[in-house]
């Protein structure tokens, strides 16, 4: 894949500098007069401007055209992935009040390794031991967190512990993960074309993946009804699978999976669904972006059996913020909480746990 930012540069000349700057992760255009960028986890306003609203809107419609999609009165929102992996979302007026709004999430060529996350203080040695044990023991893991808290990066790092001898099937809406193992088969969903034809969803791809003899499934992100398909897959084998979901805490993660499963439209009693969630998901790795822009694994929690119909989690490790300096820098430490319930299992398998 060539650096197709050149392609965006053509349409978005006023923000060329930021498209080409690898330290910029996002470019946010709020109408012709206001542009923000994200760099090192922080937003800053920059002086770039577009000549006029028609010029900006033309740029957005050209981006849409170049990926075979429409952006017009009848299709006022565009969600697209560009050939270089960047993601573009655009909304045009009158839905967008300030003029055409475009957000570009640039494709990160060098994904974060566990070692880099360690050196950034996003996790510590104990976090790594816990994650390695979860993967080695084939636990089903969900990485949760807010938008841009680092879920995909953590999922990618977690997947690096999958042994080479296993067959891994990866399903994503927009290809972001970069698994390094030899036996990885990746799939990407497809949006409907301009005639509303040809859509292929995560659910469809899970259906196919299950017939392709996976040892593990890696699903980029759960957003809807595919949660139910995933739960059923996990409860009938395929241990050691992993995914991400938008949630505010490990408990919230389980509730969100439940809510997504309900979106499948398949009627299932709530009590039965909860039991499925609690038995399918073994652990939640929760990520957060702190006030200084740093991203951390703020909690690793094991999912316990339901109690009185409610989800129970057992926190194995968490991040404790101890102080925030005047310039916003956060300091604190990772603390071990309860020992994992799979301590014995790990010992038998010769897997080292943090002490
Ligand atoms: N631990 C980290 N340290 C520094 N930057 C990170 C870290 N994790 C993620 N990032 C950066 O934050 C941005 C969002 O990360 P991503 O994993 O895509 O988040 P999410 O999947 O939660 O939306 C990316 O630019 C990524 O490179
Ligand atoms: Mg993500």
Image (spheres, rainbow, N blue to C red):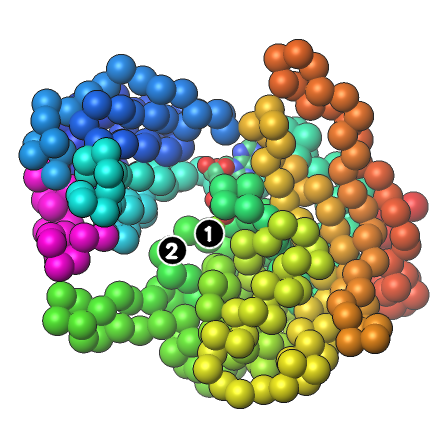
Question: Where residue 75 sits: x, y (%)?
Answer: 16, 57
Question: Where residue 249 sits: x, y (%)?
Answer: 68, 51
Identify the residue position indicated by label 2 in the image. 175
Question: Where residue 171 sits: x, y (%)?
Answer: 44, 66
Q: Quadrant of residue 139?
A: bottom right
For this orientation, the residue located farthest to the top is 326
Q: Residues within 10 Å of mark 2 (few under 14, many from 20)?
A: some
Pick whichever, 165 or 122, lies toward us.
122
Q: CA distance from mark 2 to mark 1?
A: 8 Å
The magenta segment is 58-77
Seen in the picture, residue 292 relative to 347 is either above or below; the reply is above
At 34% from the left edge and 38% from the top edge, which residue is drawn? 106
Residue 61 part of the magenta-drawn span: yes
At 86% from the left edge and 44% from the top edge, which residue is drawn? 336
Seen in the picture, residue 300 relative to 201 is either above or below; the reply is above
At 48% from the left edge and 25% from the top edge, which residue is drawn? 42
Q: Secondary structure at mark 1?
A: loop
Identify the residue position indicated by label 1 in the image. 178
Pick whichever, 175 or 41, lies toward us.
41
Q: Secondary structure at mark 2?
A: loop
Residue 304 part of the magenta-drawn span: no
At 21% from the left edge and 23% from the top edge, which residue is drawn? 33
């Amino acid at each position: 894949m060539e650096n197709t930012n050149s392609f965006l540069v053509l349409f978005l000349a006023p923000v060329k500098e930021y498209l080409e700057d690898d330290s910029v992760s996002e470019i946010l255009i709020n109408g012709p007069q206001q542009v923000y960028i994200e760099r090192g986890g922080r937003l800053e306003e920059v002086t770039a401007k577009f000549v006029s609203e028609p010029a900006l809107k033309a740029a957005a419609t050209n981006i849409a055209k170049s990926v075979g999609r429409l952006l017009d009165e009848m299709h006022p929102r565009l969600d697209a992935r560009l050939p270089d992996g960047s993601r573009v979302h655009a909304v045009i007026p009158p839905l967008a009040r300030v003029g055409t709004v475009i957000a570009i999430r640039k494709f990160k060529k060098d994904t974060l390794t566990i070692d880099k996350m360690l050196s950034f203080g996003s996790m510590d040695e104990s976090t790594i031991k816990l994650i390695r044990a979860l993967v080695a023991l084939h636990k089903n893991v969900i990485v949760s967190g807010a938008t841009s808290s680092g879920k995909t990066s953590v999922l990618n790092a977690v997947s690096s512990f999958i042994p080479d001898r296993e067959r891994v099937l990866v399903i994503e809406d927009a290809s972001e993960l970069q698994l390094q193992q030899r036996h990885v088969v990746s799939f990407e969903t497809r949006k409907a074309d301009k005639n509303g034809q040809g859509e292929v969803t995560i659910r469809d791809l899970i259906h196919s993946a299950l017939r392709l003899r996976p040892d593990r499934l890696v699903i980029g992100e759960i957003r809807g009804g595919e949660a139910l398909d995933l739960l059923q897959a996990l409860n009938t084998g395929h241990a050691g699978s992993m995914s991400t979901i938008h949630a505010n805490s490990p408990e919230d993660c389980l509730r969100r999976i439940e809510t997504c499963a309900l979106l499948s439209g398949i009627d299932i009693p709530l009590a039965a669904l909860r039991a499925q969630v609690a038995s399918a998901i073994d652990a939640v790795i929760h990520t957060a972006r702190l006030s200084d822009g740093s991203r951390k694994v703020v909690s690793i929690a094991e999912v316990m059996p339901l109690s009185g119909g409610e989800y129970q989690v057992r926190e194995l490790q968490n991040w404790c913020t101890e102080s925030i300096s005047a310039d916003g820098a956060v300091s604190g430490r990772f603390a071990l909480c309860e020992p994992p319930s799979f301590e014995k299992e790990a010992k038998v398998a010769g897997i080292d746990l943090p002490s």
